[in-house]
């Protein structure tokens, strides 16, 4: 069976697959067998089971990927505030007429 890439699915579809896999394991199927049936990597179902035990249903939800917007900022909060103080009056003056 072709491996399933959950990154290509929307959040609801991926969550449905995670819940289905968890139900299969809870009903007595081995994790390895569930992986084979669903076309997943061998450790994927194990990871989901661990997250479910730690966090419950919330552990099955996808988390956002990539850098947080705060991590990508080039200016400090103070510098950003100073720039805004200079720009906003000019913006108001130009576009409020």
Image (cartoon, rainbow, N blue to C red):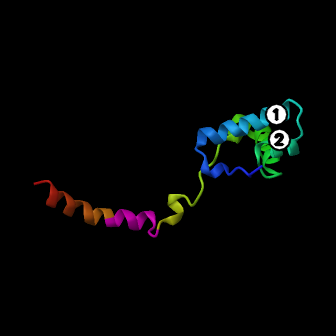
Q: The C terminus lies in which quarter of the figure?
A: bottom left
5 relative to 1 in the view: left or right: left
Ranked by sequence position, the earlier of labels 2 and 1 is: 1
Q: Secondary structure at mark 2?
A: helix
Q: Residue under circle 1? A: 24
Mainly helix, strand or loop, the magenta region? helix
Q: Residue under circle 2? A: 34
Picture coordinates of residue 43 (x, y %)? Answer: 82, 51
Q: Secondary structure at mark 1?
A: helix
Point 87% across, 45% down: residue:
32
Please identify the residue farthest to the left as the structure is shown. 97
Q: Nearer the viewer, residue 60 or 37?
A: 37
Q: Name the mark on residue 88.
A: none
Picture coordinates of residue 59 (x, y %)? Answer: 71, 41
Picture coordinates of residue 93 (x, y %)? Answer: 15, 59
Picture coordinates of residue 58 (x, y %)? Answer: 68, 38
Neighbour class for label 2 at 10 Å: few (<14), some, many (≥20)? many
Q: Is residue 77 above or below residue 46?
A: below
Q: Quadrant of residue 52?
A: top right
52 relative to 67 in the view: left or right: right
Start and end of the magenta stretch?
A: 74-83
Neighbour class for label 1 at 10 Å: few (<14), some, many (≥20)? some
Cβ–Cβ below 8 Å for labels 2 and 1?
Answer: yes
- Distance (Cα) linking label 2 and label 1: 7 Å
Q: Nearer the viewer, residue 86 or 32?
A: 32
Q: Nearer the viewer, residue 39 or 49?
A: 39
Point 86% across, 29% down: residue:
27
57 relative to 78 in the view: left or right: right
């Amino acid at each position: 069976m072709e491996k399933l890439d959950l990154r290509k699915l929307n959040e609801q579809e991926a969550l449905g697959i995670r819940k289905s896999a968890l139900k299969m394991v809870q009903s007595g199927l081995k994790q390895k067998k569930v992986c084979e049936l669903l076309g997943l990597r061998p450790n994927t179902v194990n990871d989901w089971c661990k997250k479910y035990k730690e966090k419950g249903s919330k552990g099955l939800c996808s988390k956002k990927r990539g850098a947080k917007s705060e991590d990508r900022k080039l200016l400090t909060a103070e510098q950003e505030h100073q720039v805004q103080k200079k720009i906003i009056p000019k913006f108001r003056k130009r576009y409020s007429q």
